[in-house]
Amino acid sequence: MNTFVPNRFLFDFEFPLRFRESPPEIDGSLRGWTDAELIPSLGAIDGLPDYAPVWSCWNERGIYAACRVAGKKKPLRCDPKNFRDGDNFRLCIDTRYSRANKRATRYSRQFFFLPTGGGVRRDQSVAGLGEFAGSREKDVRLPIERIRVASRIEKTGYSLEAFVPVECLPGFDPQEHPHIGFYHMLEDSELGKQYLTVGDELLWYADPSTWATAVLKTS
């Protein structure tokens, strides 16, 4: 039986993450983001062109990210209690990244963002912390209430912006450890999954060595 190995699995991807002293405002509008903050679009390597642009940048206060999903025909489906089962954007960061680590460490974090589903009316954006399968590290409570997320919903999609502060990034030290693990996953009930390097079949949610490397540069 032939086993399909995605082309992206054969590469170790590394890219610069732009420094922004004055980052875009987190209001869901996407104003202020530029092509310089676009995360490389790698899906075409496997014949799976990305359907949504993803941006990210950083400064000494934390990491910022944004995405724009278009082309939807049905309403969004988001549930904070079961975020994996609907429309969501996930961002994984490892502040002490090493491709030798096959399991998440205390420096590895998975954040999820929903464009809607929060609040009394379930119409507000939501941020939360996901778990890594097989991790041996005891989770330490993080002040996830300090994470900021905002979205704007349209008839055919949505835009979303988020800010993860350093308080939620244990080990974040751009001077001593400028190379960090970086991964994102977009899950859409209509458009499918868009991911940076590998998909579920290669266990990105358990094995950080499958992620890309982002370099925190100041110039």
Image (cartoon, grey):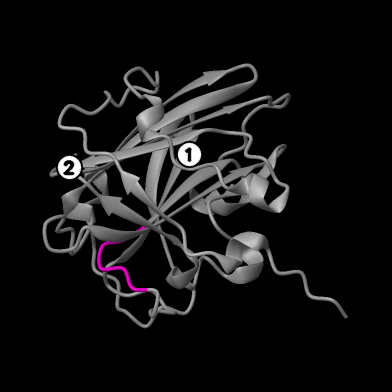
SS assignment at label 1? strand
Q: Position of residue 187 (x, y in %)?
A: 60, 45
Please name whichever residue, 146 or 43, is drawn nearer the observer in this view of the structure: 43
Q: Which residue is mark 2?
A: 218
Compare residues 51 and 85 and report the one nearer the observer: 51
Vertical position of residue 29 compared to residue 145: above or below = above
Q: Residue at x 25, y 45 (%)?
A: 145
Position in image of residue 213 (x %, y %):
38, 59
State the separation of the CA atoms marked 2 and 1.
Answer: 30 Å
Taking the image as drawn, is residue 120 in sight? no
Q: Quadrant of residue 66?
A: top left
Observer-nearest of 178 and 183: 178
Name which residue lies at 29% across and 39% down: 57
In magenta stretch: residue 164: no
Where does label 1 land, which residue? 114
Q: Quadrant of the C terminus?
A: top left
x and y percentages locating residue 111 in the rendered image = 39, 52
Q: Amino acid at mark 2?
A: Thr
Magenta extent:
93-98
Which is more N-terminal, label 1 or label 2? 1
| Residue displayed at 39% across by 23% down | 28
Residue shown at the point (18%, 58%) measured from the top left = 172
What amino acid type is highlighted by mark number 1?
A: Leu
Q: Nearer the viewer, residue 188 or 35?
A: 35
